Image: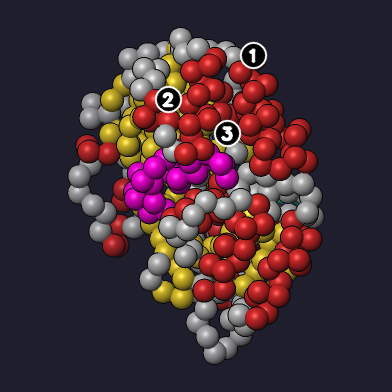
Amino acid sequence: PEQSAYRGMRPCRTMILVNPHSGRGQALQLFTGHIQAMLTEADVPYTLVITEHQNHARELVRNADLSQWDALVIMSGDGLLFEVINGLMEREDWQQAIKTPLGILPGGSGNALAASLHHYSQSPPAWNEELLLSCGFMLCKGLVGPLDLVSVHLASGQRFFSFLSLAWGFVADVDIESEKYRHVGAIRFLMGTLVRLASLRVYQGRLAYLPAKEEPKPQTENQRGSLNNHSLLPGLDQPVPDNWTVVNEEDFVLVLAIYQSHLAEDLWTVPGATADDGLIHLFYVTAGISRPALLRLFLAMEKGSHLACGCPHLAYEKVRAVRLEPTSQQGMITVDGEVVEYGPIQAQIHPGMANLIRG
Ligand code: ADP
Ligand code: MG
């Protein structure tokens, strides 16, 4: 964190977007009960916007007069921030727009970024209201630091931006299938995991990546945020360049590309990750893993000790770009917990492209 989000003096304002249906449907009550007084006390002027439908926030920030706002904050799960980031990137002035400080208050059932930010602040683990309070304090302090984004490209030509994860197989299935348990809150992922274990399946596809060590030169300040100057991706119809690694395995239980420390409040997936390490942390689990071994990995993740399990089916690589070409007819791919079109997909990191209010 380097600068403050609040320029002081003149009407500096924060737009707080609340999804009233996120999590257990209590985001608004959580805001008024825990955060409102804190912001007033800290003299942070804000305007509350309650989203009325999916993509409401996306449309709103796409058309907003950003000179009126010092920060855009979401009180929801990760899905609403996904909308806001993509709304900003769809603007003609995206290069400035994406620099608007963003903030997150956990109000959903999937609060991975909030859990990650709390973790980066080196505070002991916190859940639920305690996590919310921690994020509320960060918002009051208003310290801003860079956040890596990942551009995601589909075979249809569609492109969007992601701040958290790209998942295929087990993790994507659990994320989407567990939405029906949304009313139980963050525990939905554990419930979904147990249900999915019972019907464990294998997915066929090809996986390739650009190892982080293949691109040693750090991005200079003026390359940051520039998309065209720094593309690492060939067209999806082209073979991957020869400095990429092609995984010698086509049967997977899961592929997970993640760029924050936490996949959920109690899933510490990447020990050592930071908001702007310029890395995609690529995990995959190959076919042949037993159900108990897979369960052990997820249980160990609560303490971030899954990599120490010595599981021969788990692989972990630090990469800058990744390509996945599923060949199984059916399956699910999620980006930041949202379902995207199923098919070939590739992604690359853009170091420090956005700004985030964090501790
Ligand atoms: P959760 O963590 O509980 O899933 P999210 O913030 O991810 O919470 O929101 C879930 C989904 O709801 C996202 O796809 C988001 O785009 C969508 N959404 C946002 N606002 C609304 C709304 N007012 N009504 C319905 N869906 C919404
Ligand atoms: Mg969500």
Which residue is under mark 2? 284
Q: Secondary structure at mark 2?
A: strand
Which residue is under mark 3? 334
Which residue is under mark 1? 199
In which quarter of the view is residue 243 placed?
Answer: top left
Q: Going 61% across and 18% down the picture, which residue do you hit?
A: 197
Q: How many marks?
A: 3
Q: How is the image coloured?
A: secondary structure
Q: Secondary structure at mark 1?
A: loop
Residue 273 relative to residue 188: left or right? left
Q: Going 23% across and 52% down the picture, which residue do you hit?
A: 218
* Gap in angstroms between the C-alphas marked 3 and 1: 19 Å
Amino acid type, label 2: Tyr
Instruction: Tell which residue pokes out farthest to the left in this image.
Output: 217
In front of the other: 102 or 296: 296
Main SS, magenta region, reads loop
In front of the other: 294 or 80: 294
Vertical side of 112 occupied by 226: above or below: below
